[in-house]
Structure formats: C-alpha cells, structure tokens
Amino acid sequence: IEQQVAALNEILTVINLLHDDGVLKKREGDIMFLLAQNYLFADEPFSMKELSETLKVSWSTEKASIDEIIRKGFPVTVSQEGKTKRIRLNVKGFLDEYREKYE
C-alpha cells in the first residue's frame, strides 16, 4: 500500500502542476485525482453514475469535463459494460507521459 500512496502523491503533484500551468481546470483535476485513487485502491473502475454522485455534479456536467480531459489527450477511457458506463485513468500512462515534464 505504501507504493500506491507514493504513486497517488506523485499524481496529485503532477495534477496540481498541470492546474497551475492552466492545462487542467479544477473540476478536471478533481476528476483525474478521483480516477487515480480509484485505479490504485478499488476493485473496479468508477461508473459514470458513481463518479457524478461523488463529485456532486450532474451527469451532463461530469460528461462535459470527461470529454474535455479526453480531448486534451489524457489517458482516460470510458467503456460500456451492459447499461453501465465505466471510466478509467491509465495511471502508468499518465505518469510515464507527465512525470518527466514536471520533475
């Protein structure tokens, strides 16, 4: 679990730097951080419904932010499992891409 916590701290640092540089809006950074926590500590990815409930925003607001994150090229995927849409951040891909830029 120590490695997961260290990875989460590194992700938070990078997200904050991306926010400071104007690359991520606050809500986008919040979503990325929740997705990182989910990836590192949960058994399955967030459903879109779970994520919007956690963020206390409407589904359409959440979807617009996720679409913008994906448009910006961050390694976030949305998949369909039956009637449930699940969202996932590729943490390794994120850290590989942005770690060097912000060390």
Image (cartoon, grey):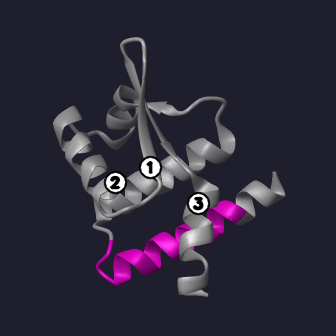
Secondary structure at badge 1 equals strand
Which amino acid lies under the numbered mark 2 shown in the image of this protein? Ile
Q: In this view, does 3 lie above or below 54?
A: below
* Rendered image: mark on residue 93: 3
Q: Name the residue under label 2.
A: 70
State the residue at coordinates (24%, 41%). Answer: 63
Q: Looking at the image, do the residues carrying marks 1 and 2 touch, with CB atoms under 8 Å apart?
A: yes
Q: Which of 82 and 27 is in front in this view?
A: 82
* Rendered image: mark on residue 76: 1
Q: Nearer the viewer, residue 73 or 99?
A: 73
Secondary structure at badge 2 equals helix
Q: In this view, does 59 lie to the left or right of 50?
A: left
The answer to which quarter of the image holds residue 38 is top right
Q: Where is residue 73 in the image (x, y as percent from the top left)?
A: 37, 62
State the residue at coordinates (18%, 43%). Answer: 61
Give the mark nearer the N terminus: 3 vs 2: 2
Q: Where is residue 15 in the image (x, y as percent from the top left)?
A: 47, 70
Secondary structure at badge 3 equals helix
Q: Does the magenta stretch include residue 29?
A: no
Q: Nearer the viewer, residue 72 or 1?
A: 72
Instruction: Identify the magenta region.
Output: 7-23
Q: Distance between the residues labelled 1 and 2?
A: 6 Å
* Rendered image: mark on residue 56: none
The crowd level at tag 1 (other Cα within 10 Å; few <14, some 14-19, many 20+) is some
The crowd level at tag 2 (other Cα within 10 Å; few <14, some 14-19, many 20+) is some
The answer to which quarter of the image holds residue 7 is bottom right
Q: Looking at the image, do the residues carrying marks 3 and 1 touch, with CB atoms under 8 Å apart?
A: no
